[in-house]
Protein backbone atom coordinates (compact mmCIF):
# COMPACT_ATOMS: atom_id res chain seq x y z
CA UNK A 1 0.00 0.00 0.00
CA UNK A 2 2.90 2.37 0.78
CA UNK A 3 4.26 1.75 -2.71
CA UNK A 4 0.93 2.61 -4.28
CA UNK A 5 0.68 5.74 -2.18
CA UNK A 6 4.12 6.94 -3.22
CA UNK A 7 3.50 6.28 -6.90
CA UNK A 8 1.24 9.10 -8.12
CA UNK A 9 0.61 7.31 -11.41
CA UNK A 10 -0.62 4.08 -9.84
CA UNK A 11 -4.25 5.11 -9.53
CA UNK A 12 -4.72 7.72 -12.23
CA UNK A 13 -7.95 7.34 -14.17
CA UNK A 14 -6.53 6.63 -17.59
CA UNK A 15 -9.95 6.60 -19.23
CA UNK A 16 -10.43 10.28 -18.40
CA UNK A 17 -6.88 11.02 -19.51
CA UNK A 18 -7.43 9.18 -22.80
CA UNK A 19 -10.58 11.18 -23.52
CA UNK A 20 -8.69 14.38 -22.67
CA UNK A 21 -5.87 13.45 -25.08
CA UNK A 22 -8.34 12.60 -27.87
CA UNK A 23 -10.12 15.93 -27.44
CA UNK A 24 -6.86 17.92 -27.41
CA UNK A 25 -5.43 16.13 -30.46
CA UNK A 26 -8.65 16.35 -32.46
CA UNK A 27 -9.00 19.97 -31.38
CA UNK A 28 -5.51 20.79 -32.65
CA UNK A 29 -6.24 19.08 -35.98
CA UNK A 30 -9.24 21.36 -36.46
CA UNK A 31 -7.27 24.45 -35.46
CA UNK A 32 -4.67 23.38 -38.04
CA UNK A 33 -7.40 23.07 -40.67
CA UNK A 34 -8.98 26.41 -39.76
CA UNK A 35 -5.78 28.46 -39.57
CA UNK A 36 -3.63 26.95 -42.32
CA UNK A 37 -3.70 27.47 -46.08
CA UNK A 38 -2.56 25.47 -49.11
CA UNK A 39 0.67 27.50 -49.20
CA UNK A 40 1.26 27.60 -45.44
CA UNK A 41 1.17 24.20 -43.81
CA UNK A 42 4.49 23.76 -42.10
CA UNK A 43 3.87 21.80 -38.94
CA UNK A 44 6.70 23.51 -37.07
CA UNK A 45 5.85 27.06 -38.10
CA UNK A 46 5.30 28.55 -34.66
CA UNK A 47 4.31 31.94 -36.05
CA UNK A 48 0.95 30.47 -37.08
CA UNK A 49 -1.98 29.87 -34.80
CA UNK A 50 -1.76 26.11 -35.12
CA UNK A 51 1.96 26.37 -34.33
CA UNK A 52 1.29 28.45 -31.24
CA UNK A 53 -1.42 26.02 -30.16
CA UNK A 54 1.15 23.23 -30.41
CA UNK A 55 3.35 25.21 -28.01
CA UNK A 56 0.39 25.66 -25.66
CA UNK A 57 -0.23 21.90 -25.74
CA UNK A 58 3.44 21.17 -24.98
CA UNK A 59 3.39 23.65 -22.08
CA UNK A 60 0.28 21.93 -20.73
CA UNK A 61 2.38 18.82 -20.06
CA UNK A 62 4.53 20.36 -17.28
CA UNK A 63 1.34 21.90 -15.87
CA UNK A 64 -0.19 18.41 -15.68
CA UNK A 65 2.93 16.99 -14.04
CA UNK A 66 2.96 19.83 -11.51
CA UNK A 67 -0.72 19.34 -10.66
CA UNK A 68 -0.27 15.58 -10.22
CA UNK A 69 2.85 15.87 -8.06
CA UNK A 70 1.15 18.08 -5.49
CA UNK A 71 -0.43 16.16 -2.63
CA UNK A 72 -4.19 16.00 -3.04
CA UNK A 73 -4.65 17.56 0.41
CA UNK A 74 -2.98 20.70 -0.92
CA UNK A 75 -6.02 21.58 -3.03
CA UNK A 76 -8.36 21.39 -0.06
CA UNK A 77 -6.09 23.12 2.44
CA UNK A 78 -5.13 25.99 0.13
CA UNK A 79 -8.38 26.31 -1.82
CA UNK A 80 -9.25 29.61 -0.10
CA UNK A 81 -5.86 31.12 -0.90
CA UNK A 82 -6.10 29.98 -4.52
CA UNK A 83 -9.55 31.54 -4.73
CA UNK A 84 -8.29 34.85 -3.28
CA UNK A 85 -5.36 34.76 -5.69
CA UNK A 86 -7.77 34.41 -8.61
CA UNK A 87 -9.78 37.39 -7.34
CA UNK A 88 -6.59 39.48 -7.18
CA UNK A 89 -5.80 38.51 -10.78
CA UNK A 90 -9.32 39.38 -11.92
CA UNK A 91 -9.21 42.75 -10.17
CA UNK A 92 -5.69 43.44 -11.41
CA UNK A 93 -6.56 42.86 -15.04
CA UNK A 94 -9.00 45.79 -14.86
CA UNK A 95 -6.02 48.05 -14.13
CA UNK A 96 -3.08 46.40 -15.87
CA UNK A 97 -4.86 44.35 -18.53
CA UNK A 98 -4.86 44.73 -22.28
CA UNK A 99 -8.10 45.61 -24.06
CA UNK A 100 -8.98 43.18 -26.85
CA UNK A 101 -12.29 43.23 -28.75
CA UNK A 102 -13.75 45.72 -26.30
CA UNK A 103 -12.92 43.73 -23.16
CA UNK A 104 -10.03 44.24 -20.72
CA UNK A 105 -9.61 40.54 -19.99
CA UNK A 106 -5.95 39.81 -20.72
CA UNK A 107 -2.55 40.26 -19.17
CA UNK A 108 0.14 40.73 -21.79
CA UNK A 109 3.59 39.24 -21.11
CA UNK A 110 5.90 39.98 -24.02
CA UNK A 111 3.30 39.21 -26.66
CA UNK A 112 1.82 36.25 -24.74
CA UNK A 113 -1.69 36.85 -23.43
CA UNK A 114 -3.04 35.31 -20.25
CA UNK A 115 -6.76 35.43 -19.43
CA UNK A 116 -7.30 35.03 -15.66
CA UNK A 117 -11.01 34.25 -16.01
CA UNK A 118 -10.09 30.89 -17.56
CA UNK A 119 -8.30 29.86 -14.36
CA UNK A 120 -10.70 31.43 -11.87
CA UNK A 121 -13.34 28.80 -12.70
CA UNK A 122 -11.18 26.01 -11.28
CA UNK A 123 -10.30 28.03 -8.17
CA UNK A 124 -13.95 28.96 -7.63
CA UNK A 125 -14.90 25.28 -7.86
CA UNK A 126 -12.24 24.50 -5.23
CA UNK A 127 -13.46 27.27 -2.91
CA UNK A 128 -17.08 26.18 -3.25
CA UNK A 129 -16.10 22.56 -2.54
CA UNK A 130 -14.17 23.67 0.53
CA UNK A 131 -17.12 25.67 1.88
CA UNK A 132 -19.72 22.97 1.29
CA UNK A 133 -17.60 20.06 2.53
CA UNK A 134 -17.47 21.52 6.04
CA UNK A 135 -19.29 19.20 8.44
CA UNK A 136 -21.18 22.12 9.96
CA UNK A 137 -22.36 23.39 6.58
CA UNK A 138 -26.07 22.97 5.86
CA UNK A 139 -27.12 24.16 2.43
CA UNK A 140 -30.77 24.35 3.47
CA UNK A 141 -30.01 27.35 5.70
CA UNK A 142 -30.44 30.71 3.96
CA UNK A 143 -27.22 32.13 5.45
CA UNK A 144 -25.23 29.22 4.02
CA UNK A 145 -26.86 29.63 0.63
CA UNK A 146 -25.80 33.28 0.67
CA UNK A 147 -22.21 32.23 1.42
CA UNK A 148 -22.24 29.88 -1.58
CA UNK A 149 -23.76 32.53 -3.84
CA UNK A 150 -21.12 35.02 -2.68
CA UNK A 151 -18.27 32.67 -3.59
CA UNK A 152 -19.81 31.98 -6.99
CA UNK A 153 -20.77 35.48 -8.04
CA UNK A 154 -17.88 37.57 -6.67
CA UNK A 155 -15.52 36.48 -9.48
CA UNK A 156 -18.44 36.71 -11.91
CA UNK A 157 -18.94 40.34 -10.86
CA UNK A 158 -15.26 41.17 -11.49
CA UNK A 159 -15.45 39.48 -14.89
CA UNK A 160 -18.60 41.48 -15.73
CA UNK A 161 -16.60 44.67 -15.18
CA UNK A 162 -14.17 43.72 -17.97
CA UNK A 163 -16.81 43.21 -19.55
CA UNK A 164 -16.94 39.53 -20.57
CA UNK A 165 -20.55 38.46 -20.20
CA UNK A 166 -19.97 35.09 -21.83
CA UNK A 167 -17.58 34.06 -19.05
CA UNK A 168 -20.02 35.46 -16.46
CA UNK A 169 -22.74 33.08 -17.61
CA UNK A 170 -20.47 30.09 -16.93
CA UNK A 171 -20.77 30.73 -13.20
CA UNK A 172 -24.45 29.85 -13.33
CA UNK A 173 -23.32 26.29 -14.02
CA UNK A 174 -22.46 25.98 -10.32
CA UNK A 175 -26.19 25.76 -9.59
CA UNK A 176 -25.98 22.16 -10.83
CA UNK A 177 -23.46 21.54 -8.05
CA UNK A 178 -25.68 23.21 -5.47
CA UNK A 179 -28.64 21.16 -6.63
CA UNK A 180 -26.63 17.94 -6.27
CA UNK A 181 -25.77 18.92 -2.71
CA UNK A 182 -29.38 19.58 -1.70
CA UNK A 183 -30.38 23.04 -2.90
CA UNK A 184 -34.12 23.09 -3.47
CA UNK A 185 -35.43 22.95 -7.02
CA UNK A 186 -37.28 26.20 -6.35
CA UNK A 187 -34.15 28.10 -7.35
CA UNK A 188 -33.96 26.19 -10.63
CA UNK A 189 -37.65 26.79 -11.33
CA UNK A 190 -37.21 30.46 -10.45
CA UNK A 191 -34.24 30.71 -12.80
CA UNK A 192 -36.09 29.06 -15.71
CA UNK A 193 -39.13 31.27 -15.10
CA UNK A 194 -36.92 34.36 -15.03
CA UNK A 195 -35.34 33.45 -18.38
CA UNK A 196 -38.74 32.79 -19.95
CA UNK A 197 -40.14 36.12 -18.70
CA UNK A 198 -36.99 37.87 -19.91
CA UNK A 199 -37.31 36.50 -23.45
CA UNK A 200 -41.08 37.00 -23.63
CA UNK A 201 -40.73 40.62 -22.51
CA UNK A 202 -38.18 41.28 -25.24
CA UNK A 203 -40.35 39.60 -27.86
CA UNK A 204 -43.82 40.92 -27.00
CA UNK A 205 -43.04 44.09 -25.07
CA UNK A 206 -43.39 45.16 -21.45
CA UNK A 207 -47.10 46.03 -21.36
CA UNK A 208 -48.38 42.82 -22.95
CA UNK A 209 -46.25 40.51 -20.79
CA UNK A 210 -47.01 42.50 -17.63
CA UNK A 211 -50.77 42.22 -18.18
CA UNK A 212 -50.55 38.56 -19.21
CA UNK A 213 -48.34 37.60 -16.24
CA UNK A 214 -50.50 39.34 -13.64
CA UNK A 215 -53.63 37.77 -15.15
CA UNK A 216 -52.13 34.26 -15.08
CA UNK A 217 -50.86 34.73 -11.52
CA UNK A 218 -54.21 36.03 -10.31
CA UNK A 219 -56.21 33.21 -11.88
CA UNK A 220 -53.76 30.63 -10.53
CA UNK A 221 -53.92 32.02 -6.99
CA UNK A 222 -57.72 32.21 -7.04
CA UNK A 223 -57.92 28.62 -8.27
CA UNK A 224 -55.50 27.33 -5.60
CA UNK A 225 -57.22 29.27 -2.80
CA UNK A 226 -60.67 28.10 -3.93
CA UNK A 227 -59.60 24.48 -4.31
CA UNK A 228 -58.07 24.39 -0.83
CA UNK A 229 -60.92 26.44 0.66
CA UNK A 230 -58.42 28.89 2.14
CA UNK A 231 -59.38 32.06 0.30
CA UNK A 232 -59.70 34.21 3.44
CA UNK A 233 -56.69 32.67 5.16
CA UNK A 234 -54.47 32.85 2.08
CA UNK A 235 -51.10 34.61 2.63
CA UNK A 236 -52.06 37.70 0.66
CA UNK A 237 -49.11 39.90 1.79
CA UNK A 238 -46.72 37.42 0.16
CA UNK A 239 -48.88 37.47 -2.96
CA UNK A 240 -48.72 41.26 -3.10
CA UNK A 241 -44.93 41.19 -2.70
CA UNK A 242 -44.78 38.61 -5.51
CA UNK A 243 -46.84 40.90 -7.74
CA UNK A 244 -44.53 43.84 -7.01
CA UNK A 245 -41.30 41.90 -7.62
CA UNK A 246 -42.62 40.35 -10.84
CA UNK A 247 -43.84 43.71 -12.14
CA UNK A 248 -40.57 45.42 -11.30
CA UNK A 249 -38.60 42.66 -13.01
CA UNK A 250 -40.62 42.84 -16.23
CA UNK A 251 -40.49 46.63 -16.23
CA UNK A 252 -36.75 46.50 -15.56
CA UNK A 253 -36.16 44.11 -18.46
CA UNK A 254 -38.14 46.35 -20.78
CA UNK A 255 -36.27 49.46 -19.67
CA UNK A 256 -32.88 47.74 -19.92
CA UNK A 257 -33.61 46.42 -23.40
CA UNK A 258 -34.90 49.78 -24.65
CA UNK A 259 -32.54 52.23 -22.97
CA UNK A 260 -29.37 50.44 -21.79
CA UNK A 261 -28.44 47.68 -24.23
CA UNK A 262 -26.34 48.65 -27.24
CA UNK A 263 -27.94 48.19 -30.65
CA UNK A 264 -25.75 45.21 -31.54
CA UNK A 265 -26.80 43.52 -28.28
CA UNK A 266 -30.48 44.12 -29.08
CA UNK A 267 -29.93 42.73 -32.56
CA UNK A 268 -28.52 39.47 -31.18
CA UNK A 269 -31.64 38.89 -29.10
CA UNK A 270 -33.91 39.90 -31.98
CA UNK A 271 -32.17 37.46 -34.30
CA UNK A 272 -32.36 34.67 -31.73
CA UNK A 273 -36.07 35.26 -31.20
CA UNK A 274 -36.76 35.56 -34.91
CA UNK A 275 -37.89 39.19 -34.77
CA UNK A 276 -35.38 40.16 -37.44
CA UNK A 277 -33.13 38.38 -39.92
CA UNK A 278 -29.69 39.81 -40.59
CA UNK A 279 -27.41 37.35 -42.33
CA UNK A 280 -25.04 40.05 -43.55
CA UNK A 281 -24.64 42.05 -40.34
CA UNK A 282 -24.83 40.99 -36.71
CA UNK A 283 -25.95 37.47 -37.65
CA UNK A 284 -23.23 36.95 -40.27
CA UNK A 285 -21.00 34.70 -38.15
CA UNK A 286 -23.78 32.32 -37.17
CA UNK A 287 -25.23 32.28 -40.70
CA UNK A 288 -21.87 31.38 -42.24
CA UNK A 289 -21.22 28.81 -39.50
CA UNK A 290 -24.51 27.06 -40.21
CA UNK A 291 -23.82 27.02 -43.97
CA UNK A 292 -20.35 25.62 -43.31
CA UNK A 293 -21.67 22.83 -41.08
CA UNK A 294 -24.44 22.04 -43.57
CA UNK A 295 -21.94 21.79 -46.44
CA UNK A 296 -20.16 18.95 -44.63
CA UNK A 297 -23.06 16.57 -45.10
CA UNK A 298 -23.04 13.17 -43.46
CA UNK A 299 -19.39 12.13 -43.81
CA UNK A 300 -17.75 15.51 -44.30
CA UNK A 301 -15.44 16.74 -47.02
CA UNK A 302 -12.32 15.32 -45.44
CA UNK A 303 -9.41 16.71 -43.43
CA UNK A 304 -8.11 19.94 -45.02
CA UNK A 305 -10.70 19.61 -47.79
CA UNK A 306 -13.26 22.07 -46.42
CA UNK A 307 -13.47 24.81 -49.03
CA UNK A 308 -15.50 27.10 -46.79
CA UNK A 309 -13.08 26.60 -43.92
CA UNK A 310 -10.10 27.18 -46.20
CA UNK A 311 -11.86 30.21 -47.67
CA UNK A 312 -12.25 31.82 -44.23
CA UNK A 313 -15.98 32.29 -44.68
CA UNK A 314 -16.53 32.02 -40.93
CA UNK A 315 -14.93 34.72 -38.77
CA UNK A 316 -13.16 33.41 -35.66
CA UNK A 317 -13.38 29.90 -37.06
CA UNK A 318 -10.40 28.71 -35.04
CA UNK A 319 -11.73 30.11 -31.74
CA UNK A 320 -15.41 30.46 -30.83
CA UNK A 321 -16.65 28.97 -34.13
CA UNK A 322 -14.27 26.01 -34.36
CA UNK A 323 -17.20 23.58 -34.37
CA UNK A 324 -18.11 24.79 -37.88
CA UNK A 325 -14.77 23.39 -39.08
CA UNK A 326 -15.60 20.06 -37.44
CA UNK A 327 -18.98 20.05 -39.18
CA UNK A 328 -17.60 20.76 -42.65
CA UNK A 329 -14.52 18.54 -42.71
CA UNK A 330 -15.80 15.66 -40.59
CA UNK A 331 -19.52 15.91 -41.28
CA UNK A 332 -22.37 14.64 -39.15
CA UNK A 333 -20.35 11.57 -38.17
CA UNK A 334 -17.38 13.62 -36.95
CA UNK A 335 -19.56 16.15 -35.16
CA UNK A 336 -21.40 13.33 -33.40
CA UNK A 337 -18.07 11.76 -32.44
CA UNK A 338 -16.95 15.02 -30.81
CA UNK A 339 -20.21 15.35 -28.89
CA UNK A 340 -19.99 11.71 -27.78
CA UNK A 341 -16.45 12.31 -26.52
CA UNK A 342 -17.67 15.22 -24.41
CA UNK A 343 -20.60 13.14 -23.12
CA UNK A 344 -18.24 10.30 -22.19
CA UNK A 345 -15.97 12.78 -20.40
CA UNK A 346 -18.87 14.23 -18.44
CA UNK A 347 -20.29 10.83 -17.49
CA UNK A 348 -16.85 9.62 -16.46
CA UNK A 349 -16.26 12.65 -14.23
CA UNK A 350 -19.69 12.31 -12.62
CA UNK A 351 -19.15 8.56 -12.12
CA UNK A 352 -15.80 9.20 -10.44
CA UNK A 353 -17.27 12.02 -8.37
CA UNK A 354 -19.85 9.66 -6.93
CA UNK A 355 -17.08 7.19 -6.02
CA UNK A 356 -15.20 9.72 -3.90
CA UNK A 357 -14.76 8.94 -0.22
CA UNK A 358 -14.18 12.64 0.46
CA UNK A 359 -17.00 15.18 0.14
CA UNK A 360 -14.61 17.89 -1.03
CA UNK A 361 -13.52 15.77 -4.00
CA UNK A 362 -17.09 14.88 -4.93
CA UNK A 363 -18.28 18.48 -4.93
CA UNK A 364 -15.26 19.63 -6.93
CA UNK A 365 -15.87 16.82 -9.45
CA UNK A 366 -19.41 18.02 -10.00
CA UNK A 367 -18.05 21.53 -10.43
CA UNK A 368 -15.72 20.30 -13.19
CA UNK A 369 -18.54 18.47 -14.98
CA UNK A 370 -20.90 21.45 -14.70
CA UNK A 371 -18.39 23.93 -16.13
CA UNK A 372 -17.48 21.73 -19.10
CA UNK A 373 -21.16 20.90 -19.76
CA UNK A 374 -22.12 24.57 -19.80
CA UNK A 375 -19.25 25.46 -22.14
CA UNK A 376 -20.10 22.70 -24.61
CA UNK A 377 -23.85 23.39 -24.65
CA UNK A 378 -23.49 27.17 -25.01
CA UNK A 379 -20.69 27.09 -27.60
CA UNK A 380 -22.26 24.50 -29.90
CA UNK A 381 -25.70 26.09 -29.41
CA UNK A 382 -24.21 29.44 -30.43
CA UNK A 383 -22.53 28.02 -33.56
CA UNK A 384 -25.68 26.26 -34.81
CA UNK A 385 -27.83 29.33 -34.07
CA UNK A 386 -30.09 28.19 -31.22
CA UNK A 387 -28.35 30.42 -28.66
CA UNK A 388 -27.13 34.01 -28.97
CA UNK A 389 -23.49 34.75 -29.74
CA UNK A 390 -21.78 35.37 -26.40
CA UNK A 391 -18.23 34.27 -27.15
CA UNK A 392 -17.09 31.37 -24.99
CA UNK A 393 -14.63 28.70 -26.17
CA UNK A 394 -15.27 25.06 -26.94
CA UNK A 395 -13.11 23.15 -24.42
CA UNK A 396 -9.85 21.77 -25.90
CA UNK A 397 -10.87 22.85 -29.42
CA UNK A 398 -10.86 26.63 -29.48
CA UNK A 399 -7.50 28.28 -30.07
CA UNK A 400 -5.86 29.81 -27.02
CA UNK A 401 -3.40 28.92 -24.30
CA UNK A 402 -5.46 30.30 -21.41
CA UNK A 403 -8.49 28.23 -22.40
CA UNK A 404 -6.47 25.02 -22.85
CA UNK A 405 -4.51 25.47 -19.62
CA UNK A 406 -7.61 26.47 -17.68
CA UNK A 407 -9.49 23.31 -18.66
CA UNK A 408 -6.37 21.19 -18.20
CA UNK A 409 -5.98 22.55 -14.67
CA UNK A 410 -9.67 22.00 -13.99
CA UNK A 411 -9.63 18.33 -15.04
CA UNK A 412 -6.25 17.23 -13.69
CA UNK A 413 -6.89 18.63 -10.23
CA UNK A 414 -9.86 16.29 -10.12
CA UNK A 415 -7.80 13.41 -11.53
CA UNK A 416 -5.27 14.06 -8.77
CA UNK A 417 -7.99 14.09 -6.11
CA UNK A 418 -9.44 10.87 -7.48
CA UNK A 419 -6.09 9.08 -7.87
CA UNK A 420 -5.37 8.79 -4.14
CA UNK A 421 -8.81 8.97 -2.63
CA UNK A 422 -8.11 5.77 -0.69
CA UNK A 423 -4.77 6.85 0.65
CA UNK A 424 -4.72 10.59 1.28
CA UNK A 425 -7.77 10.79 3.54
Image (cartoon, helix red, strand yellow):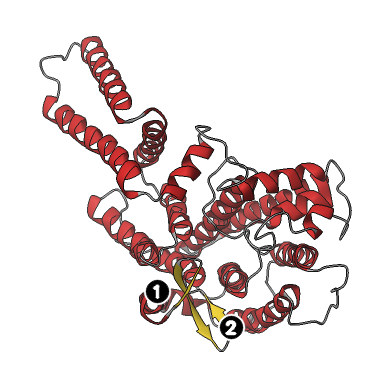
Residue furthest front as drawn: 280
* Left or right of 237 in this view: 401: right
Secondary structure found at label 2: strand
* Left or right of 238 in this view: 5: right
- Dividing the image into 4 quarters, which one contains the N terminus? bottom right
Q: Which residue is mark 1?
A: 90
Q: Residue at x 55, y 79 (%)?
A: 113
User: 343 or 88: nearer the eye?
Assistant: 88
Q: Quadrant of residue 62?
A: bottom right
Q: Position of residue 52 (x, y in %)?
A: 70, 78
Q: Which residue is mark 2?
A: 112
Q: Position of residue 206 (x, y in %)?
A: 30, 31
Q: Position of residue 37 (x, y in %)?
A: 83, 68
User: 330 or 135: nearer the eye?
Assistant: 330
Mark found first going from the N terminus, 2 or 1:
1
Q: Quadrant of residue 413?
A: bottom right
Secondary structure found at label 1: helix
Amino acid sequence: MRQLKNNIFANLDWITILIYVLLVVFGWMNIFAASSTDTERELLDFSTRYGKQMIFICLAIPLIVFVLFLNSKFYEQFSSLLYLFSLVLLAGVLVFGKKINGATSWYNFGGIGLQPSEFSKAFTALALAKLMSDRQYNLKLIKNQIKAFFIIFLPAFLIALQPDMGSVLIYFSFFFVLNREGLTLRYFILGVTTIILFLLTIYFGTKIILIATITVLTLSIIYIAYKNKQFLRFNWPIVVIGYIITSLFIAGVGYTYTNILEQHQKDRFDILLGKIKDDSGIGYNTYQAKLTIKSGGFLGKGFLQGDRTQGNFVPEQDTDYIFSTVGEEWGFVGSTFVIILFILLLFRIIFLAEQQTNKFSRIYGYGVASIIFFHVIVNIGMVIGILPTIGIPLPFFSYGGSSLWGFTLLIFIFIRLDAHKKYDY
